[in-house]
Amino acid sequence: MRRAGLHTRAWDCQPYDRISPSPRTAARRAGALHRLAHWDAKRDGTLIVIATVSGVLQRVAPRAVMQTAGISARQGGVVEVERLTAYFAANGYTRTATVSERGDFAVRGGVIDVFPASAEEPVRLDFFGDTLESVRAFGVETQRTTRQLKGVEFTPVSEVLIDEAAISRFRSGFLKRFGGAVSGDPVYDSVSAGARPQGAEHWLPLFHDGDGRRVRPVRHPGKPDPGSER
């Protein structure tokens, strides 16, 4: 039987701090959850998830959200540059001058540099119009090409997805919990303006339908559900 391992990290900050987890930690966790959401035991074999207690107890985005939050691009294919950059903005990527960490992206004319959540190296996308002419991995320190790729898959670098629907859910949930006297709250005002403020991840359930989920054991075929005995 095939087996694979997956490390689900906890955030490296305290609950309800006005700071976000580090980009590296947030990207690795979101990438792991995206992979977990797509895992099929019958098709892919056994997946062993390694996590700390806090990593398991922490609320996560709904599985359906993480399943549909990926996007891919292949050499020779047509990719709308505006749609791609909008995807990066909505899924936690940060626009920078130079790409150095997971979740960074930079746009220079028809060239987009981006460091995907699950990749070991950033990639350089070279466009002619909306046609992707080449995909190249490159080194962070040298910024030079290390290898040619046929394509690349992008996954979220944050469990907080900022789009119009998520902003509306956040505003409604925030007002329901704290009443109408929220003017001047930096998180509420920033999210209302479509920005991603520091510490937004701690309000994760407000961005999604429901109150957030936790990673839970999945019943193995032929074995009792771990929760059925409780």
Image: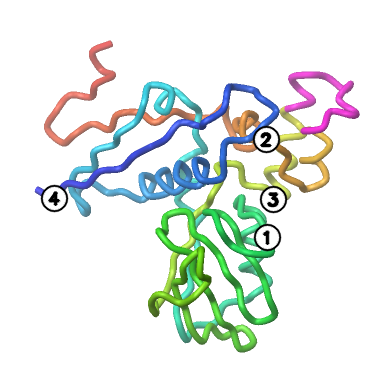
Q: Amino acid at mark 2?
A: Ala
Mark 3, residue position: 163
- As drawn, 119 above or below 108: above
Residue 80 in picture, x, y percent from top left: 62, 76
Mark 4, residue position: 2
Q: Which residue occupies 57% across, 69% down?
A: 113
- As drawn, 94 above or below 16: below
Quarter that holds the C terminus: top left
CB-based contact (under 8 Å), mark 2 and mark 3:
no
N-term mark: 4 or 1: 4
Q: Amino acid at mark 1?
A: Thr
CB-based contact (under 8 Å), mark 1 and mark 2:
no
N-term mark: 1 or 2: 1
Mark 2, residue position: 200
CB-based contact (under 8 Å), mark 4 and mark 1:
no
Residue 23 in picture, x, y percent from top left: 56, 45
Based on the picture, tell me whether residue 195 belongs to the magenta stretch: no
N-term mark: 3 or 4: 4
Furthest residue to the top? 230
Gap in angstroms between the C-alphas marked 4 and 1:
40 Å
Gap in angstroms between the C-alphas marked 2 and 3:
14 Å
- As drawn, 12 above or below 91: above
Mark 1, residue position: 96
Gap in angstroms between the C-alphas marked 3 and 4:
38 Å
Looking at the rendered image, the disc whose residue lies closer to the viewer, 4 or 2, is: 2
